[in-house]
Amino acid sequence: MSVAHSSVRPVTAGTECAYCGSDRSPHDPVFAEEATDGPDDERESVGEFRNYACLHEWIEAAALVYGTACERSPDG
Ligand SMILES: [Zn+2]
């Protein structure tokens, strides 16, 4: 999953935060999207949030942080 800041996408007015349901348009929204299993490296939106706090709370609520880790190889 990757997180894209609003500066790279147009903001659609009048939509709700995926976590708290508040109108996110007056704020600085954050979009999350996830790679699909499709052949073309497609991505689908998993949520649009009012800010990083809502994204954080949503991730915690969905327990997405458990069982995952960033894997790094010392050989690059
Ligand atoms: Zn929210």
Image (cartoon, rainbow, N blue to C red):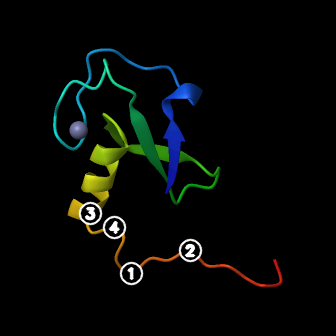
Left or right of 27? Residue 70 is right
For this view, does 20 lie left or right of residue 35? left
- In front: mark 3 or mark 4? 3
Give the spatial CA distance, label 3 vs label 2. 17 Å
Distance between the alpha carbons at the discs numbered 1 and 2: 10 Å
N-term mark: 2 or 4: 4
Q: Residues within 10 Å of mark 1 (few under 14, many from 20)?
A: few
Instruction: Check residue 7 in the rendering and tell me which mark sits there, or answer none.
Output: none
- Quick one: label 3, few (<14), some, or many (20+) residues within 10 Å? few
| Residue 42 position within the rendered picture, expressed as x and y whole percent measured from the top left | 57, 47
**In the drawing, what numbered circle is on residue 64?**
4
* Extreme residue toward the bottom, this view: 74
Q: Amino acid at mark 1?
A: Gly
Contact between labelled residues 4 and 2, with CB atoms less than 8 Å apart? no
Left or right of 48 in this view: 10: right
Contact between marks 3 and 4 (CB within 8 A): the answer is: yes
Asked if residue 31 lies left or right of residue 8, the reply is left
- Identify the residue position indicated by label 1 in the image: 67
Identify the residue under disc 2: 70
- In percent of width and height, residue 65 lies at 36, 70
Amino acid marked by disc 2: Cys
Residue contact between numbered discs 3 and 2, judged by CB atoms under 8 Å: no
Disc 4 Cβ-to-ligand 1 distance below 8 Å: no
Q: Which mark is residue 60?
A: 3
Point out the image quarter for the C terminus.
bottom right
Labels 3 and 1 touching (C-beta < 8 A): no
**Residue most toward the left?**
21
Q: CA distance from mark 2 to mark 4?
A: 13 Å
Q: What residue sits 58% from the left and 29% below the top?
A: 8
Of callouts 3 and 2, the N-terminal one: 3
